[in-house]
């Protein structure tokens, strides 16, 4: 179990940590700024001391994080290390992730899937394809990102979440449960969603996203893909 520092501050780029376990290429630390693949968002890359981290995944335990090294790691439990994420890449992921929250607030239909990668991001909606108009969506998205709205994270109990099912738009990437509380991301006046990912502090940081593709990926999956300008 690791202290997940990105949950309280997504802008932490580096910290000191202690190695708690090493298993082949996977290194676990007592605390981390690395976000593990989850909720559709790609895992972080970066460095532990001079060694390259090529991906980050969830481990078996609730808050366990596996830093996947380029090659079997010479690190051993007890080692004090300096860790740092590839910040430029992560910030792009944060901008794209937050842009998807905005997109979800514009398209009022059930969300059936989603993914945030380095170069592009998409959401799938259960909606008729002809209701998704590229120019109209892009215009509304950019109207939002041209304003300044501060985002904030808050926590509610599992029971509160069960009583408010509208807080979980994306069933296929539902937030982690079981710890008794669930994290919400609020973009005041725009969106309120259960989400464990990393987001920008102000939607103005997103810039000007463009909708690059709208296509059918199945009966209940109409995919809207965006890129950052
Ligand atoms: Zn999110």
Image (tube, rainbow, N blue to C red):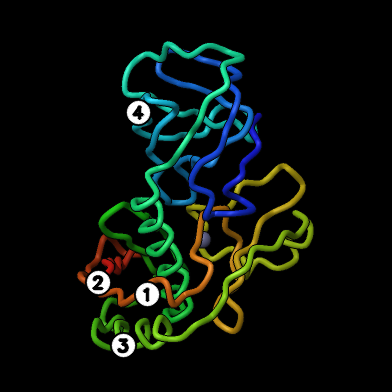
Tell me residue 211's x, y (percent).
25, 74
Residue 229: image tag: 2
Q: Nearer the observer, disc 3 or disc 2?
A: 2
- Could you tell which of marks 2 and 1 lies nearer the N-terminus? 1
Q: Which residue is mark 4?
A: 52
Residue 98 vs residue 153: left or right? left
Q: Is the C-beta separation of discs 2 and 1 under 8 Å?
A: no
**Closest to the observer, 88 or 208:** 88
Which label's residue is closer to the chain start, 1 or 4? 4
Q: Residue at x 26, y 60 (%)?
A: 217
Q: x and y percent of residue 74 in the render?
A: 42, 11
Percent x, y of residue 187: 57, 75
Label placed on residue 139:
3
Front disc: 2 or 1: 2
Cα distance in 3D space between marks 3 and 2? 13 Å
Whole-number angstrom distance, CA of label 2 to CA of label 4: 29 Å
Residue drawn at x 41%, y 70% is 99
């Amino acid at each position: 179990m690791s202290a997940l520092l990105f949950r309280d501050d997504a802008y932490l780029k580096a910290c000191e940590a202690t190695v708690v376990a090493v298993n082949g290429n996977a290194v676990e630390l007592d605390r981390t700024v690395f976000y593990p693949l989850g909720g559709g968002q790609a895992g972080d890359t970066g460095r532990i001391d001079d060694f390259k981290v090529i991906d980050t995944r969830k481990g078996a335990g609730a808050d366990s994080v596996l830093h996947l090294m380029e090659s079997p790691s010479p690190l051993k439990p007890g080692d004090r290390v300096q860790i740092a994420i590839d910040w430029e890449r992560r910030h792009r992921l944060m901008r794209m992730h937050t842009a998807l929250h905005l997109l979800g607030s514009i398209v009022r239909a059930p969300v059936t899937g989603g993914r945030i990668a380095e170069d592009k991001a998409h959401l799938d909606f259960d909606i008729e394809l002809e209701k998704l108009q590229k120019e109209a969506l892009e215009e509304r998205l950019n109207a939002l990102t041209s304003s300044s709205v501060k985002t904030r994270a808050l926590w509610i109990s599992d029971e509160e979440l069960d009583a408010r099912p509208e807080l979980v738009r994306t069933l296929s990437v539902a937030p982690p449960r079981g710890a008794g509380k669930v994290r919400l991301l609020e973009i005041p006046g725009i969106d309120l969603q259960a989400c464990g990912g990393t987001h920008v502090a102000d939607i103005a940081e997103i810039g000007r996203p463009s909708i690059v593709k709208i296509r059918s990926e199945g009966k209940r999956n109409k995919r809207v893909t965006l890129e950052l300008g």
